[in-house]
């Protein structure tokens, strides 16, 4: 199975590890993410102003590129890895589906592009893993069980808000936990799993981000988590960098590693992964201590 894939800017810069791991995981599970031949930034944030067409043009061009590749691959799906890209593309797409006049107008405006028909389905990598592959098949492919590794699945706010774009329960999400359980990990429950990490406030109001991250990490520590796992590049960045500041200020007594879900999947699904595990000694040590290796 081949899926058109939109990486977005972050996956080519600070989120490279997420993309590298996800592309390998896809092959290990028998599908392929085919990057759109040309793409632009999604716009980063969905503009809620009802009459601003210009802010949606970048996302619209991406939808058209997906439409073009979809004809080649015989699919109407477009896969994203980045939570922010997923949020923006899905909301823009829903706007066109719910407002035919806006779709008509944007097609008139973008007269050098083919018309967007509004039939693309935006899905996140997590949805492919859960719905198209399934936890049971993933479990069958495990080469390195994450035996007794205590993981805290952290969604952040962009995947499940607003409700119109959510693919999992906003109150009690389980998709990521089910996948992690299939790898043999022990999933802990953290009530902060869908709370915001502070997002783009890291640029303008770092203290707000530190407050958010402190609440998330404090509960994670109290639950005994060995690692926080997230599918979101911005969450991974904020949780990692903010913990450093919090630790230096004495607001937390230890730091919890934060890695991408794709990285943990790669560790678990890869055979003879000693070289790869060198970059994740904290996981290797935990697994060895608990008989997982």
Image (cartoon, rainbow, N blue to C red):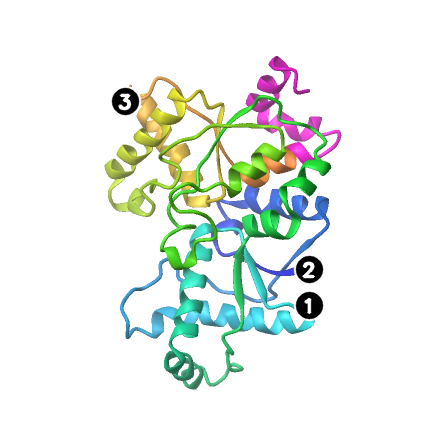
Residue 29, horizontal then vertical, whole percent: 70, 46
Residue nearer the viewer, 175 or 122: 175
Q: Secondary structure at mark 3?
A: loop
Task: Say which quarter of the image contains residue 106.
Answer: bottom left
Q: Which mark is residue 285?
A: none
- Disc 2 versus disc 3: nearer the observer: 2
Measured Cα–Cα span from mark 2 to mark 3: 48 Å
What is the number of the mark on residue 73? 1
The first of marks 2 and 3 along the sequence is 2
Q: Earlier in the sequence, mark 2 or mark 1?
A: 2
Residue on which the image places disc 2: 2
In the visual, does 286 lie left or right of 165?
Answer: right
Quadrant of residue 251 within the rendered picture: top left
Circle 3 is placed at which residue position? Answer: 249
| Mark 1 vs mark 3: in front | 1
Question: Which element is circle 2 on?
Answer: strand
Q: Determine whether 9 is above or below 55 in the image.
A: above
Placement of 37 over or under 255, stated as above or below: below
Residue 143 as seen in the image, left or right of residue 57: right
Residue 5 in the image, given as x and y percentages of width and height: 59, 59
- Mark 3 packing: few (<14 Cα in 10 Å), some, or many (20+)? few
Distance CA(mark 1)–CA(mark 3)? 52 Å
- Determine whether, in the image, residue 234 is placed left or right of residue 37: left
Q: Quadrant of the C terminus?
A: top right
Magenta-colored span: 268-293
The correct choice, above or below, for 76 with respect to 206 in the image is: below
Disc 1 element:
helix
Q: CA distance from mark 2 to mark 1?
A: 7 Å
């Amino acid at each position: 199975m081949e899926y058109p894939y939109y990486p977005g800017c972050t996956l080519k810069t600070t989120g490279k590890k997420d993309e590298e791991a996800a592309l390998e995981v896809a092959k290990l599970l028998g599908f392929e993410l085919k990057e759109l031949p040309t793409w632009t930034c999604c716009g980063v944030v969905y503009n809620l102003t009802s009459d601003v067409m210009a802010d949606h043009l970048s996302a619209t061009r991406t939808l058209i590129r997906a439409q073009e590749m979809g004809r080649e691959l015989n699919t109407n799906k477009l896969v994203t890895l980045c939570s922010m890209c997923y949020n923006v593309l899905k909301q823009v797409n829903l706007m066109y589906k719910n407002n035919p006049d806006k779709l008509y107008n944007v097609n008139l405006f973008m007269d050098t592009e083919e018309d967007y028909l509004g039939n693309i389905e935006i899905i996140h990598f997590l949805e492919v893993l859960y719905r198209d592959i399934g936890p049971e098949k993933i479990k069958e492919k495990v080469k390195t069980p994450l035996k007794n590794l205590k993981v805290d699945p952290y969604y952040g706010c962009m995947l499940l808000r607003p409700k119109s774009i959510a693919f999992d329960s906003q109150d009690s999400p389980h998709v990521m936990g089910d996948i992690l359980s299939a790898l043999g990990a022990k999933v802990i429950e953290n009530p902060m799993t869908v709370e915001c990490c502070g997002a783009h406030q890291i640029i303008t109001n770092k203290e707000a981000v530190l407050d958010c991250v402190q609440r998330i990490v404090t509960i994670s520590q109290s639950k005994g988590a060995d690692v926080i796992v997230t599918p979101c590049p911005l969450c991974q960045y904020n949780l990692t960098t903010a913990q450093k500041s919090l630790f230096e200020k004495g607001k937390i007594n230890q730091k919890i590693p934060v890695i991408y879900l794709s990285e943990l999947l790669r560790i678990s699904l890869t055979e003879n992964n000693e070289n790869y595990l060198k970059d994740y000694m904290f996981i290797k040590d935990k697994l060895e201590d608990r008989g997982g290796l």
